Image: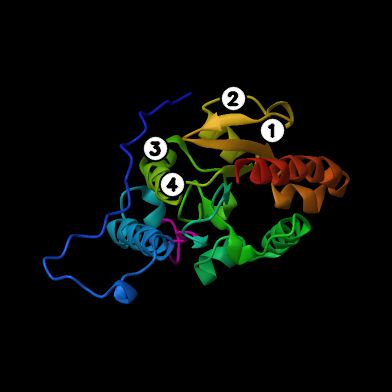
Amino acid sequence: MFVPAPPGRLEPESAGDSTDEAPERARPSPAVQVSRNAAEALSAVRADIGDCTRCKLHAQGRKQIVFGVGNPNADLMFVGEAPGADEDLQGIPFVGRAGQLLTRIIEAIDLKREDVYIANVIKCRPPGNRNPEQDEVETCEPFLFQQIDIIKPKVIVALGTFAARTLLRTLDPISRLRGRVYEYRGAKLIPTFHPAYLLRNPGSKREVWEDMKVVRGLLKTEN
């Protein structure tokens, strides 16, 4: 199993000091400044990706890069595998049937989709929705690491075997990984089944609900 070294943390830029004193009312609150810095830092990562040609996926039919979407200061982040056909068309992760189910899962723990951040390990759709290959992961995952380090979520949910294996550097199946809480890049990581798997195996929804109750509890504890 490949184990590339994690990249250095990309910290949000701090506001520069000004020689001219501004009225207090003109200065953004710390919360607003943090939000602005995180959003700007994510935009910088997206700009760095550009119209990416770093791996072979750019020449294998991808229509656009699917970067990520949501609150740049989210306490909860979901990480999936790679874009599917709907995501490739719209440029937004999890917008197909699996995405609709993910939205309902988020709402079940009293959050809205815009409260969380959603991304994938891979930013381009693999042809035929095949699993991403090792060289593609090694090329693309540093951008995911940067997203995580900028957002600084309290909890990360790894959706499905591929995302969980990639983040945790293991070959164990999701059935063995779920049900536990892992420390990951300053966050708590919870592996669970991918929404697409639930569409094929609705009997596993109960297990996902148990995982999401753990997520909800961690969010309350960490606040």
Q: Earlier in the sequence, mark 3 or mark 4?
A: 3
From the viewer's perspective, is the residue at label 4 or at label 1 nearer? 4
- Does residue 167 appear left or right of residue 32 in this picture? right
Three-letter amino acid code at the position of disc 2: Leu
**Residue 171: assigned label:** 2
Q: State the separation of the CA atoms marked 4 and 1.
A: 20 Å
Residue located 78% across and 57% down the image: 108
Distance from the alpha carbon under mark 2 to that under mark 4: 20 Å
Q: Residues within 10 Å of mark 1 (few under 14, many from 20)?
A: many
* Of pointers 1 and 3, the one earlier in the residue sequence: 3
Q: Is residue 161 left or right of residue 143?
A: right
Work out whether residue 47 or residue 30 is closer to the camera in this orientation and state it. Answer: 30
Local SS, label 4: helix
- In space, the residues marked 3 and 4 are separated at their CA atoms by 11 Å
Looking at marks 4 and 1 on the same chain, the residue that comes earlier in the sequence is marked by 4
Q: Which mark is residue 174?
A: 1
* Disc ID at residue 138: 3
Circle 3 — which element? helix
Pair 3/4: label in front: 4
Q: CA distance from mark 2 to mark 3?
A: 16 Å
- Tell me whether the residue at label 2 lies in contact with that at label 4, contact meaning CB atoms closer than 8 angstroms: no
Which of the marked residues, 2 or 4, is nearer the chain's N terminus?
4
Q: Nearer the viewer, residue 19 or 8?
A: 19
Q: Which circle's residue, 2 or 3, is located before the other in the chain?
A: 3
Residue 175 horizontal/vertical position (percent): 74, 30
Q: Is residue 194 left or right of residue 188?
A: right
Asked whether the residues under the numbered discs 3 and 4 touch, taking CB atoms below 8 Å apart as contact, a structural biologist would say: no
Q: Inspect the image, locate mark 1, and give the three-letter code of the amino acid beneath it.
A: Ile
**Magenta span covers which residues?**
60-68
